[in-house]
Image: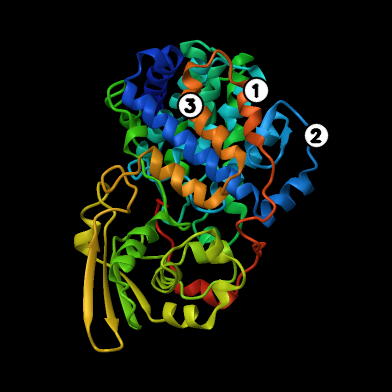
């Protein structure tokens, strides 16, 4: 199916989408296992919390000012304002992703939640939806996005933001609108036909358009659900065309595999480092190896998908977040990789840059063979005293399979980023009990909060990069 699409492949995609649409339309949170709802609540806590953190950065503040949006029924999380539904969905999605802290899923090969949660929560606030319907819609958004992520194998160099996840946004919004099985399927298929074809190097070279892809995904999902509600959408298996023949390859069987018994939301990861998830195992290993001695050089062995993040030069926050040498050097020198790591001139610090130039990143066949279940890294440090030590990490800390985070851990991470801001206390309470709430509109608008006096990051990303750094890096194939 790679590069070619036949009638049989679109028929198969349409049939799988029809089955998925029926599942979405009938999904009731009361019938979902308690452990799944608990994990959903934790994902809501995480992604809305990091959106509130991202909203305080200079670039997101400038974006809201340029947008000049009128007030509306939907919250802009942590920004002290409300906005129309589509505006809130776009701005929240961008803020959610801009610090590289939002929850992700290695099996989906990206970030299912950020592709649909901003749209669903904005629409839920406008409709003052019940907690039960909101929970079902969020689950639909996550599970459908994750299944489309599993089904899609993007061409080399394509970034996963804004393509396979649009179907999830459409599914969640369709469920919240109470659409029937065939209409939900039409919404999902329409969402699958509105992908962004973004290149991974836009991220590695520091172009914030990479965050805009997620705003586009959420507003496209809203549009797809509205088209379906209006009766002007159809299910023709278009994913086999858009995600398949144009952007890569598409396996419709993944859309319905273990449908209703496997919950991908329980298999995700939370982030403790403000950087691309491919850099996390190396940073975790570096933290194990940093013992106060001066580091001479570092060798990072990782899987083939992460080996391309080898850039040793950067000129803004986003490009630094996609540099394993930067992240490893920051972990070695600072003991953490947080939003403030990118502030106050730290990325330009000569000592950090010098150490980063002594970090080598290579692909290791044995680590590549462990994908997708393990995203491992092996780090060898040579100290200036001549000693050498090695540490291997099977997955990032915070992955469901490796030192997973519970509610206390996620809350603690957010507390460190938001401080005593009341929006966090409201968010903790909302995430714990929203599924049982009669209505969620007012509680969601309460999560707009009031901006903190001092933002966690005082830098404004640039939109250009040094041309002489591009050849040094090779983009990963699919994942982030």
Q: For the residue carrying disc 3, how many other residues have a C-alpha within 10 Å: few (<14), some (14-19), or many (20+)?
A: many
Q: Secondary structure at mark 3?
A: helix
Frontmost residue, 401 versus 310: 401
Q: Is residue 428 above or below residue 435?
A: below
Q: For the residue carrying disc 1, how many other residues have a C-alpha within 10 Å: few (<14), some (14-19), or many (20+)?
A: some
Q: Secondary structure at mark 2?
A: loop
Residue that carries the numbered disc 1 in the rendered image: 442
Q: Residue at x 47, y 22 (%)?
A: 135
Q: Position of residue 314 (x, y in %)?
A: 54, 72
Q: CA distance from mark 2 to mark 3?
A: 26 Å
Residue that carries the numbered disc 3 in the rendered image: 138
Frontmost residue, 111 versus 472: 111
Q: Is residue 235 visible?
A: no
Residue 182, numbered label: none
Q: Is residue 260 above or below residue 192?
A: above
Q: Residue at x 63, y 38 (%)?
A: 77
**Left or right, residue 16 beside residue 420:** left
> In front of the other: label 3 or label 1?
1
Frontmost residue, 290 versus 297: 290
Frontmost residue, 184 versus 427: 427
Q: Position of residue 478 (x, y in %)?
A: 40, 51
**Mark 2 / mark 1, whichever is N-terminal:** 2
Q: Badges 2 and 3: C-beta atoms under 8 Å apart?
A: no
**Mark 2 / mark 3, whichever is N-terminal:** 2
How did the renderer colour the structure? rainbow
**Farthest residue, direction left:** 366
Q: Is residue 154 visible?
A: yes
Residue 70, numbered label: 2
**Mark 3 / mark 1, whichever is N-terminal:** 3
**Farthest residue, direction bottom:** 385
| Res. 233 image quadrant | top right
């Amino acid at each position: 199916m790679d590069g070619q699409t036949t009638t049989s492949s679109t028929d198969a995609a349409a049939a799988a989408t029809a089955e998925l649409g029926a599942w979405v339309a009938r999904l009731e949170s009361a019938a979902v296992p308690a452990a799944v709802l608990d994990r959903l609540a934790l994902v809501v806590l995480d992604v809305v919390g990091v959106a509130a953190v991202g909203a305080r950065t200079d670039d997101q503040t400038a974006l809201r000012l340029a947008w000049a949006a009128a007030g509306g029924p939907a919250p802009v999380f942590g920004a002290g304002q409300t906005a129309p539904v589509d505006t809130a969905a776009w701005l929240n999605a961008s803020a959610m992703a801009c610090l590289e802290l939002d929850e992700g899923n290695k099996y989906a090969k990206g970030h299912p939640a950020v592709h649909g949660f901003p749209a669903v929560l904005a629409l839920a606030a406008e409709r003052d939806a019940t907690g039960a319907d909101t929970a079902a819609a969020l689950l639909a958004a996550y599970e459908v996005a994750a299944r489309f992520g599993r089904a899609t194998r993007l061409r080399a160099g394509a970034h996963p933001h804004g393509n396979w996840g649009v179907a999830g946004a459409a599914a969640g919004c369709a469920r919240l609108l109470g659409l029937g099985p065939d209409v939900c399927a039409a919404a999902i298929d329409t969402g699958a036909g509105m992908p962004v074809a973004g290149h991974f190097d836009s991220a590695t070279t520091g172009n914030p358009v990479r965050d805009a892809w997620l705003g586009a995904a959420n507003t496209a999902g809203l549009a797809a659900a509205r088209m379906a509600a209006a009766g002007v959408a159809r299910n023709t298996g278009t994913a086999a065309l858009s995600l398949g023949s144009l952007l890569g390859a598409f396996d419709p069987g993944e859309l319905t595999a273990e449908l209703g018994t496997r919950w991908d939301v329980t298999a995700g990861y939370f982030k403790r480092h403000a950087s691309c998830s491919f850099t996390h195992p190396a940073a975790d290993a570096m933290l194990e190896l940093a013992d106060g001695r001066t580091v001479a050089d570092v060798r990072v062995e990782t899987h083939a998908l992460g080996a391309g993040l080898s850039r040793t030069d950067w000129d803004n926050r986003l490009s630094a977040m996609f540099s394993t040498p930067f992240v490893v050097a920051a972990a070695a020198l600072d003991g953490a990789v947080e939003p403030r790591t990118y502030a106050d001139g730290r990325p330009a610090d000569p000592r950090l840059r010098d150490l980063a130039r002594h970090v080598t990143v290579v692909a290791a066949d044995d680590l590549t063979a462990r994908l997708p279940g393990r995203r491992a890294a092996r780090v060898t440090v040579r100290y200036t005293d001549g000693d050498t030590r090695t540490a291997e990490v099977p997955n990032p800390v915070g992955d469901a399979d490796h030192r997973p985070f519970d509610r206390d851990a996620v809350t603690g991470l957010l507390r460190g980023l938001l401080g005593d801001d009341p929006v966090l206390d409201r968010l903790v309470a909302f995430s714990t009990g929203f599924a049982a709430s009669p209505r969620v509109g007012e509680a969601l608008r309460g999560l707009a909060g009031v901006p903190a006096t001092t933002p966690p990051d005082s830098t404004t990303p640039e939109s250009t990069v040094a041309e002489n750094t591009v050849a040094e890096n090779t983009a990963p194939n699919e994942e982030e």
